[in-house]
Amino acid sequence: MKRLLVDTLVITERNLIRLPRSPDLLLAFTVQPIMFVLLFVYVFGGAISTPGFTYVDFLIPGIIVQNIAFGGFVTAIGLNEDLSKGLIDRFRSLPMARPAVLAGRTLADVVTNLLSVIVLLITGFIIGFSFGTGIGEILAGLLLLMFFGYAFSWVFALLGLMVSSPESANSLGFIAVFPLTFISSAFVPVDSMPAALQWFADINPFTFMVDAMRSLWLGSPAGNSIWGAVAWTVAILVIFAPLAVGRYRSAAGT
């Protein structure tokens, strides 16, 4: 167990050290989220009715959840690159715990996700967002966000191990996750959608997560959104982590 922990931290450090040398990835965590916030607030915000909230307050939890879910694309691209370049074979030849490669990748995503949340919150504060709850609820929301992002990193880990190129990993992840974020309560109230889409949005994990964040950060009625978000996050982790590990063992020949 100690060996696994040490090896995981080493792989995590390796992945984080690479980020400053990849300006395009840093832009994805900083500039791109800011652009999304500004575009939605100042282009679409005036046309979208959000009873009980200003659009800025309504939007920030939703766009942070979207950004957190997409944070795992670095894991998908990185794993695919390591596999195609033979680096996974080199890891196999080292005296290291086998699960450390995936565990280190997904743990590094927690750090980058936290960076993107900070960037989005600062942007939100500048344009008028404010918390409506106490420090306990705010921290609980942040922990839930990190847990949700960590679970989705395993989804992207599986995608990265299934496709043939880093570009395909990024594209497939976008195709799989992007519709889920838009058919949810992230950007518009669910009751403004057609009936068929409302049905899907009501059971969408992103709707549970966004509603949970609005409850924890803005003080809106929670209903079953918080427990639903936790349940969905655990389900995603329980399903996709073993699948990713199994695919990794098959791809690495272990």
Image (tube, rainbow, N blue to C red):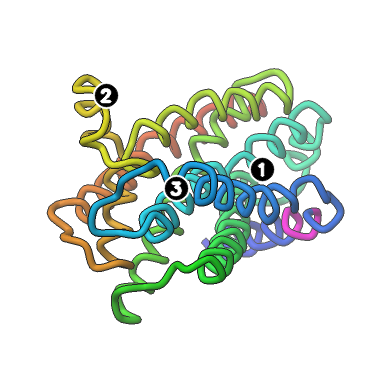
Please name the residue that numbered disc 2 is placed on: 197
Comparing 6 with 167, the one in front is 167
Image coords of residue 169 (percent x, y): 65, 27
Residue 2: name its quadrant: bottom right
Q: Amino acid at mark 1?
A: Val
Callout in the foreground (1, 3): 3
Please name the residue that numbered disc 3 is placed on: 45
Image coords of residue 120 (percent x, y): 56, 61
Please name the residue that numbered disc 1 is placed on: 74
Q: CA distance from mark 1 to mark 3?
A: 30 Å
Residue 182: name its quadrant: top left
Label 3 SS? helix
Q: CA distance from mark 2 to mark 1?
A: 30 Å
Image coords of residue 161 (percent x, y): 62, 27
Residue furthest to the bottom:
135
Does the magenta stretch mainly form a helix, a strand or a loop?
Answer: helix
Disc 2 or 1, which lies upstream in sequence?
Answer: 1
Q: Amino acid at mark 3?
A: Gly
Callout in the foreground (2, 1): 2
CB contact under 8 Å: marks 2 and 1: no
10 sits left or right of 183 in the view: right
